[in-house]
Image: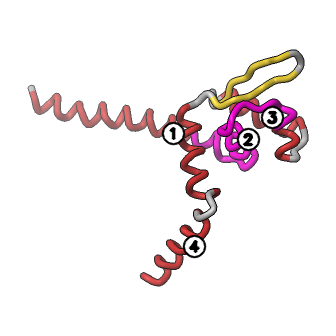
Amino acid sequence: MKSSQNREKPAQDMVQLARAATEASDFLKALANENRLLLLCLLAEGEKSVTELEDTLKLRQPTVSQQLARLRADDLVATRRVGKAIYYSLCSDQAGMVMDLLYKMFCQKDAKSARTTEKSARVAAE
């Protein structure tokens, strides 16, 4: 009896792993756009209106709205309306964590020099 349970357990684990992989893939697809990453980066700093986002990114309203709609559909951002203005904020802890990591990896002052040093070390090791 135990041996059949042991055989079923890895199969169940694979089903769970496959579901998690699909969820992670969908999440990464939502991030896989430069404009969406920029929007999330700004929203990681705090709530912003559509106008603030347009002005900061120097993008046209239709472009910003299209990308925000994708982020909203993926439950990464939330909206709040005040009169005619719409405000966006991050509503996903996962998105916040990933944005923090991406900031550390690519945006911090010493991030580029660390990547260059790391790449040089790999090339030298080859």
Q: Residue at x 57, y 73 (%)?
A: 116
Label 2 – label 4 distance at C-alpha: 26 Å
Label 4 – label 1 distance at C-alpha: 28 Å
Q: Earlier in the sequence, mark 2 or mark 4?
A: 2
Q: Are the residues flagged by discs 2 and 3 in contact, CB closer than 8 Å?
A: no
Q: Is residue 51 above or below residue 57?
A: above
Q: Which residue is mark 4?
A: 116
Residue 24 got which mark? 1
| Residue density around tag 2, few if under 14, some if 14–19, many if 20 or more, within 10 Å | many
Task: State the quadrant of the C terminus.
Answer: bottom left
Which residues fall within the magenta stretch? Answer: 27-52
Which marked residue is nearer to the observer: mark 3 or mark 4? 4
Q: Label 2 is placed on what type of residue?
A: Leu
Image quadrant where residue 108 sits: bottom right
Q: Label 1 is placed on what type of residue?
A: Ala
Q: Is residue 24 left or right of residue 8?
A: right
Q: Earlier in the sequence, mark 4 or mark 1?
A: 1
Q: Earlier in the sequence, mark 3 or mark 4?
A: 3
Q: Is 107 within the magenta?
A: no
Which marked residue is nearer to the observer: mark 1 or mark 2? 2
Q: Residue at x 17, y 33 (%)?
A: 6
Q: Which residue is mark 3?
A: 66
Q: Are the residues flagged by discs 4 and 1 in contact, CB closer than 8 Å?
A: no
Image quadrant where residue 15 sits: top left
Numbered label tally: 4
